[in-house]
Image (spheres, rainbow, N blue to C red):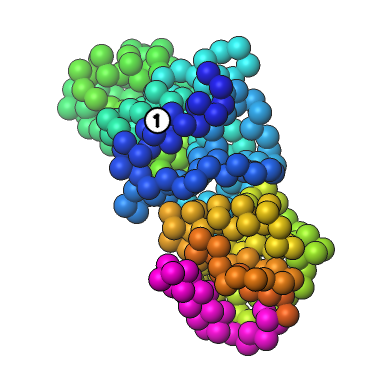
Amino acid sequence: MSRSALVGNVTAMLEDAGFMVSDRCAIRPKSFDIAARRGEDLILVKILANIDAFNRATGQEMRRLGTYLNATPLVIGLRSRDEDLKPDVVYFRHGVPVFSPDTAYNLFIEEVPPLIYAAPGGLYVNIDGDLLAGERQDRDWSLGQLAGELGVSRRTVSKYEDGMNASVEVAMTLEEMFDAPLTSPVDVLEGAEDVHESEATPDDPEADPDDEQVVAVLTRAGYSVHPTARSPFTAVSEDEDDSDIVLTGHSKFTKAAEKRARIMSSIGQVMGTQSVYVVDRAKQESVDGTALVERDELATFRNTDELRDVIRERSEYEEAA
């Protein structure tokens, strides 16, 4: 299957699952292919045939964007090296959850979350330690007795009951032994970090030298500006109380810039953000809802309210037209 067809299939699946899906980010470099929203769930999705192409720099960018936009970064792929990704298993690459289209279908369409995740050494599941302790005590077994049945140490059983995860084999043995479900699913959208060693969110990259003036003006106006390295926008800007998020672009107004502005607008509609593109000269006020602001005009804004009003007026003008 071509990558283009795979992106189309994943997009259609998410739409069938009730997600609002952005236009594809058909530009380079890019850290994600589509953004999607269903209710309170926001996701940024990278779609790859071979997940080995997902590198550290891209993973760091997706995790930064997830923090800025309050979204979950995900990779949906078919295989790693010469092996297909196993169904209903969550893998991790550079701190980002990775799974197959079949797993995505079960999660988003069937609403059956995966139970298994891959980590160094094999496949693991979450054990509900309280349930395990309750089942053991109901049988009046000591920690040592259960450890003997499993062929592990007493300390290991104690760790299972304290919340340590177990191999698939141990989990299956426990469920057969007690004839009870003792595992809990991997919460991909909320708590995936709980099942692997999560790294701290990477620091922002340095702003491109061409963007430094724009960053300085936005900062002076009261925004916290987070430069990006592999996105259709050059920065994510937040106002002082984090109530207003603006996707920010900056370049000469070319056909490529117009394309970026359209993608920014589509992502903004999905993410619930505004978008503004700073250009040297503009012959129109907006592109599909992304406000255009000339560099000299931007320098006149004194606070976030003034910029917010301009973005709203120009976006509304285009919608009315």
Q: Nearer the viewer, residue 198 or 318?
A: 318
Start and end of the magenta stretch?
297-321
Foreground pick, 264 / 141: 264
Q: Is residue 259 visible?
A: yes
The amino acid beneath tag 1 is: Ala
Q: Quadrant of the C terminus?
A: bottom left
Q: Main secondary structure of the magenta part?
A: helix
User: Which of the pair 25/134 is nearer the observer?
Assistant: 25
The one nearer the camera, 217 or 120, is 217
Is 310 magenta? The answer is yes
Q: Which secondary structure, mark 1?
A: helix
The quadrant in which residue 3 appears is top right
Where is residue 141 drawn, in percent x and y? 25, 22
- Inspect this view and state whether residue 228 appears: no
Placement of 136 over or under 247, stated as above or below: above
Position of residue 293 measured from the top left corner of the image (x, y, whole percent): 63, 73
At which x and y percent is residue 22?
46, 47
- Residue 44 lies in magenta, yes or no? no
Left or right: residue 219 compared with residue 276: right
Residue 146 position, x and y percent, is 32, 19
Q: Residues within 10 Å of mark 1 (few under 14, many from 20)?
A: many
Q: Is residue 226 above or below residue 158?
A: below
Q: Residue at x 47, y 69 (%)?
A: 318
Q: Residue at x 65, y 71 (%)?
A: 283
In the visual, does 144 lie left or right of 207? Answer: left
Q: Residue at x 56, y 68 (%)?
A: 286
Q: Choose top left, top right, bottom left or bottom right for residue 186.
A: top left
Task: Give the residue pinned by disc 1.
Answer: 104
Direction left: furthest residue? 138
